């Protein structure tokens, strides 16, 4: 058994405290960078089980063009992701979409998406004129005021409250595709408090879903003087992970891939980690540990250390999806409009969303159409069991029916993300609170990632910065944890 970084038998502490980050996705890389950028004299090691860091951020090529095979945008109204991009040398490459106007493919055509708050309509007149739902559904929604004030003190499923207050058609054709696009989840299972947190205080103030959405809803268009909602990086958002990895290494951090952590133990002076294959385990000592892995492996590593937190993490389920990226010859007779469209699951299509990448991002060339089609949501694993060729064919047929785009297929790639997106089911915020309370009982231990406060890049990075600050605050002058 190899041993790395153990405290000597005489008890003399390490020259510098050692912070170990388990997980090399964007959360783990951000946590490592935050520790190193703090100015503290620390040693930082990142351990990643996969052959590459970056997690759900990945760039590739389709028909010779760089594309994102995972996340392809980041909220710019939150500062964390754009700030990190600037810190790691990508500030000049941050860009905003050429267009963010989106549609919904339903009832026979792609219809403009009206102003909504995560699918809850902010303007019923615009909804009526757009035809996403029938006129009876709009009349039904107008009756919400007669139901009195909505109390959302207790958490509730988004789909349940929308169906009760506005009717099932608005839930099925607006809220469901929106939540499916963001969370790959189902409206009747996802938490209102966790998935649309900004809506809760608005409901408390205004009394209902429609009035709250009208007060806080955002327009799908990027027009006007409002700051852009989304940002990207020229060449792909996946570059953020690559650049952060390089920044960590440049600052003196160590990043090791193909290293699986199997055990995590508390010691008198810190932590003892067992990594690598069972036939040749490696023992690593650390003064602090940041767990930046999904909920299930985190639960396994914490089983003995914090049993209560481990049990709560084990209750977080994940959804799988596939991204089918198509490169099609441009059809001058069929001009794609906007940034893409969502698809309600009630329409029984294969794809749940399509993004017109070559129209959305100005850095793409104009010689062909690059389209990302997303497939899969919670409980929909059977659809993803088809071969890559079958998924490409199905995505192309759906795209052609929705838009009329019939240009020849030049290239295609399928990227499968198994167990990629945590499901924020009812009670998620309380679950996360209990996890953090449990983890806080162990000095020097912190958690971060998409399982906690949001799936978007800024939210993941924020949890990483919080975890880094937490372990740094606990490091004593001699490199051991206080407490």
Image (cartoon, helix red, strand yellow):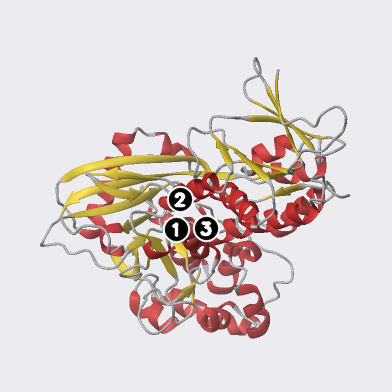
Decide which of tag 3 and tag 2 comes sooner along the chain: 2
Q: Secondary structure at mark 2?
A: helix
Disc 3 versus disc 2: nearer the observer: 2
Residue placed under numbered mark 2 in the picture: 243
Residue at image location 74% in from the left, 71% down from the top: 153
Horizontal relation, residue 372 to residue 280: left or right? left
Report whether residue 172 is seen: no
Q: CA distance from mark 3 to mark 1?
A: 17 Å
Residue at image location 45% in from the left, 50% down from the top: 243
Horizontal and vertical percent for residue 193? 65, 65
Report whether residue 26 is seen: yes
Horizontal and vertical percent for residue 239? 41, 51
Q: Is residue 385 above or below residue 144?
A: above
**Can you tell which mark lies on residue 457?**
3
- Crowding at mark 1 (Cα within 10 Å: few <14, some 14-19, many 20+): few
Q: CA distance from mark 1 to mark 2?
A: 7 Å
Decide which of tag 3 and tag 1 comes sooner along the chain: 1
- Crowding at mark 2 (Cα within 10 Å: few <14, some 14-19, many 20+): some
Tell whether label 2 touches label 1 (CB within 8 Å). yes
Q: Quadrant of residue 321?
A: top left
Horizontal and vertical percent for residue 362? 27, 64
Residue at image location 69% in from the left, 47% down from the top: 42
Decide which of tag 1 and tag 2 comes sooner along the chain: 1
**Can you tell which mark lies on residue 237?**
none
Q: Secondary structure at mark 3?
A: helix
* Towards the viewer: 205 or 370: 370
* Towards the viewer: 19 or 310: 19
Residue placed under numbered mark 1 in the picture: 89
Q: Is residue 77 above or below residue 146?
A: above
For the N terminus, the quadrant is: top right
């Amino acid at each position: 058994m190899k041993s790395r970084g153990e405290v000597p038998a005489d008890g003399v502490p390490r020259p510098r405290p050692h912070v170990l980050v388990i997980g090399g996705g964007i959360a783990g890389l951000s946590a490592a960078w935050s520790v190193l950028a703090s100015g503290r004299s620390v040693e930082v090691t990142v351990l990643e089980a996969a052959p590459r860091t970056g997690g759900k951020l990945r760039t590739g090529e389709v028909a010779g063009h760089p594309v994102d095979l995972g996340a392809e945008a980041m909220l710019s109204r939150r500062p964390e992701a754009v700030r990190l991009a600037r810190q790691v040398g990508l500030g000049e490459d941050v860009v905003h979409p050429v267009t963010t106007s989106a549609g919904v493919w339903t009832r026979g055509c792609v219809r403009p998406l009206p102003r909504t708050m995560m699918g809850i309509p902010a303007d019923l007149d615009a909804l009526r004129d757009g035809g996403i739902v029938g006129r009876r559904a709009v009349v039904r929604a107008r009756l919400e005021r007669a139901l009195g004030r909505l109390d959302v003190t207790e958490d509730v499923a988004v789909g349940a409250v929308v169906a009760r207050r506005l009717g099932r058609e608005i839930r099925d054709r607006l809220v469901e595709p929106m939540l499916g696009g963001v969370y790959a989840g189902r409206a009747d299972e996802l938490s209102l408090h966790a998935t649309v947190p900004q809506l809760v205080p608005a409901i408390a103030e205004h009394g209902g879903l429609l009035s709250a959405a009208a007060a806080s809803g955002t327009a799908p268009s990027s027009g006007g003087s409002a700051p852009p909602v989304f940002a990207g990086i020229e060449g792909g958002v996946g570059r953020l992970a690559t650049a952060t990895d390089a920044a960590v290494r440049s600052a003196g951090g160590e990043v090791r891939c193909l290293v699986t952590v199997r055990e995590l133990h508390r010691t008198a002076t810190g932590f003892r980690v067992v990594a690598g294959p069972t036939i040749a385990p490696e023992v690593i000592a650390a003064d602090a540990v940041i767990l930046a892995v999904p909920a299930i492996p985190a639960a396994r590593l914490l089983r003995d250390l914090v049993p209560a937190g481990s049990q709560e993490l084990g209750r977080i389920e994940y959804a799988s999806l596939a991204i089918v990226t198509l490169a099609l010859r441009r059809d001058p007779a069929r001009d794609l409009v906007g940034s893409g469209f969502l698809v309600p699951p009630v329409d029984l299509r294969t794809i749940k969303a399509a993004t017109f990448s070559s129209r959305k991002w100005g850095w793409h060339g104009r010689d062909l159409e690059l389209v990302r089609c997303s497939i899969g949501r919670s409980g929909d694993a059977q659809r993803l069991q088809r071969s890559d060729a079958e998924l490409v064919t199905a995505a192309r047929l759906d795209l052609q029916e929705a838009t009329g785009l019939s240009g020849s297929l030049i290239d295609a790639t399928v990227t499968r993300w198994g167990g990629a997106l945590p499901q924020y089911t009812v009670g998620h915020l309380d679950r996360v609170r209990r996890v953090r309370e449990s983890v806080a009982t162990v000095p020097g231990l912190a958690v971060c990632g998409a399982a906690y406060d949001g799936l978007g890049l800024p939210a993941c990075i924020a949890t990483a910065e919080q975890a880094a600050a937490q372990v740094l605050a606990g490091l004593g002058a001699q490199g051991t944890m206080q407490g």
